[in-house]
Amino acid sequence: MKLLVFCEAHADFLTASALVDRVLHDEGPAWVSVLLRSHPESIREWASDGHGKEFFDIHKLEAYRRDLGNVRFMPGHFDGKPGAAGAQTARNAFAIAREVGKRDPSIRLEAVFIVWDMDDQGELRRKGLAQARTEGSRWASFQIVLGCPDPMREAWVLAGFEPESDEEHARLGELRRELGFSPCDEAHQLDAKDEQAKRNPKRVVRWLTGDDREREARCLTEAPLERLRERGAASGLREFLEEVKARVVPLCQGSPASALRARPQG
């Protein structure tokens, strides 16, 4: 499968791609699980932005537009209604994705993701992305998957955190007392933007993981999906996992042999 993701940073890409692999591994056909461990590139490939990144920066759509020869961005309403927050940006992103797909007709672009922190625009941004997807789905040849971390992607990381040592147990206990709630069960309440504020999710993740990126990654790669779904209901994580299951897993067609034949050589 050729996949493309629009997001804000490399960390967002790592989070989204890890979760996609988790769902494909745990809820896809058995042969997909086997190949993801041995030949992941035979199952899915992420489209490069042409500048060495495995994701497209959602804040650089004008630059991609120029790279691709001035892709036409369509302004205007959505089904007769003004676009909510992010709707026009998402519409433009889908136009970029369509052009990227045209550039290499030998590889069909099968799914396009937008993974975008909700910050303090949660309800309006979710509405805007949904407006753009409804419109885009009428012409797109690819599945459209929305990821809406609320308030930001660190809330998804926290949903998978489970203490692995006495030190981590102590850190989590200290945070519970400081915040008045469990940051893992209710990460959506961590809504402070200031990274030094006690309710800032970035600060909480750094404290719990010892600012260890490998430890942070394990929160997503090793946590049971049921834990992620249960704790991530209010932060948009459960919805994202369900979208991947409903929209991406069915794309795993064919057989192990055909997937291996199709994988890049060299």
Image (cartoon, rainbow, N blue to C red):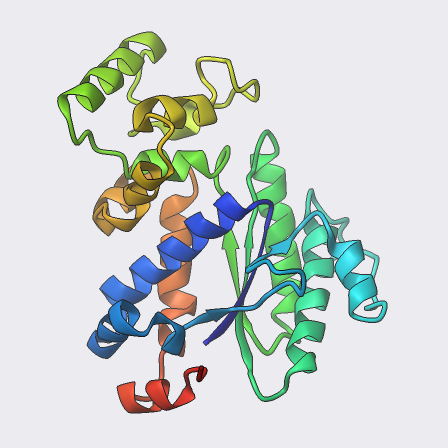
Count of numbered tags: 0
Seen in the picture, residue 204 relative to 39 is either above or below; the reply is above
Side (left or right) of 180 relative to 4: left
Image quadrant where one finds the C terminus:
bottom left
Q: Is residue 140 above or below residue 54?
A: below
- Front residue of 227/9: it is 9
Residue at image x 44%, y 22%? 203
Q: Nearer the viewer, residue 201 or 167?
A: 167
Q: Nearer the viewer, residue 76 or 217?
A: 217
* Residue 80 visible in the current orientation: no
Where is residue 193 drawn, in percent x and y?
Answer: 57, 22
Residue 65 visible in the picture: yes
Residue 21: horizontal and vertical position, in percent? Answer: 34, 61
Position of the N terminus by quadrant: bottom left
Residue lying at 40% horizontally and 73% vertically, measured from the top left: 41
Residue 144, position in %: x, y?
54, 65
Q: Compare residues 107 and 251 and report the one nearer the observer.
A: 107
Q: Which quadrant would residue 50 be assigned to in this image? A: bottom right
Residue situated furthest left in the rendering:
166
Q: Residue at x 56, y 37 (%)?
A: 118
Residue at the far top: name it: 178
Image position, residue 232 (x, y; %): 34, 40
Above-or-below relation of 234 to 49:
above
Left or right: residue 42 versus residue 128 is left
Tell me which residue sits at (22%, 73%) in the image: 34
